[in-house]
Amino acid sequence: MNTRVQELERIAAQYHLNDDVVDKFIEDLCQEYCCDWLATLVQPAHDVVELGYGEGVTVSRLGHLARRYTVVEGAPTLAERLRTEHPDLVVAEALFEDWLPPQPCDVLLALHVFEHVDDPVALARHLRSWVAPDGEMVVIVPNRDSLHRRLGVAMGLQPELDTLSPRDLLVGHQRVYDLDGLEADLAAGGFETVERRGFFAKALPNALMLGLGPEHIRGLNVLAEGLPASLCANIAVRVRPIG
């Protein structure tokens, strides 16, 4: 098992498969809300590829909507869980950087991926070959400029907006993006942006929101629809191959 796969297995064991992580419900509810938008981008005739299984929220919501739905997962334990829970889907157990699809896809979902990888521009260039000329990739990442990070700096809880928190390190984040930085990396990889969105009006860290119920989390996601994307906890872009 190489070093990268070992790191993915660490994250799987310490986060995705760890029921003692008490704030996962917040992230899961936010992903559920995002799926309302993502579902509008997937058509019955589409060939969809998703990068990573994670908690399985998007697979459960979107996997039945497309003609073919493939999940690329590098952690063996999560790949096995995916095969067990979703035997009707295609599972490619591989690192993103090493895999190639049998044919270009219509929709590529890179949800909370680019903040994890060693070389995001190289990955974007690699992924460009996965997407059909008239297809698109959807990218979602945590936002460097979100309200809760701004508050953290204002309160002296973190020195800079892009300082990685203990939670960032737990889940394997290597960076945090703003919109300009994300779009610059994707442009360097051969993509152009066609839509920008923000999700989750998050003013406090997860640890201070553990007492909130699902209705509060959904309300904060609805509230984010009226805010600039640059203030939201997560930023999303739809991009298409250039040329």
Image (cartoon, rainbow, N blue to C red):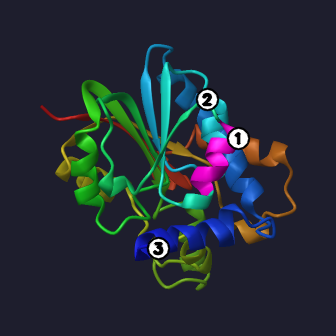
The residue where tag 1 is placed is 85
Q: Amino acid at mark 1?
A: Glu
User: In the picture shown, does residue 115 fall above or below 66?
Assistant: below
Pointer 3 local density, CA inside 10 Å: few below 14, some 14–19, many at least 20 = many
Mark 3 vs mark 1, foreground winner is 1
Q: Amino acid at mark 2?
A: Asp
What residue is drawn where x is 54% and y is 52%? 232
Q: Which residues are magenta?
A: 78-86
Q: CA distance from mark 2 to mark 1?
A: 9 Å
In terms of secondary structure, where does tag 1 sit?
helix
Give whichever of discs 3 and 2 has the lower sequence position.
2
Q: Position of residue 194 (x, y in %)?
A: 31, 32
Q: Quadrant of the C terminus?
A: top left
Q: Which residue is mark 3?
A: 161
Using the rendered image of the protein, determine whether residue 34 is visible from the camera's viewpoint.
yes
Q: What residue appears at the point 61 percent right and 37 percent down from the top-left corner?
A: 59
Is residue 83 in the magenta section? yes
Q: Amino acid at mark 3?
A: Leu
Look at the numbered disc 2 and give the secondary structure of its residue. loop
Where does label 2 land, which residue?
Answer: 88
Seen from the viewer's position, the closer of residues 207 and 3 is 3
Earlier sequence position, callout 3 versus callout 1: 1
Position of 65 with respect to 17 (left or right) is: left
Q: Is 33 inside the magenta-drawn segment?
A: no
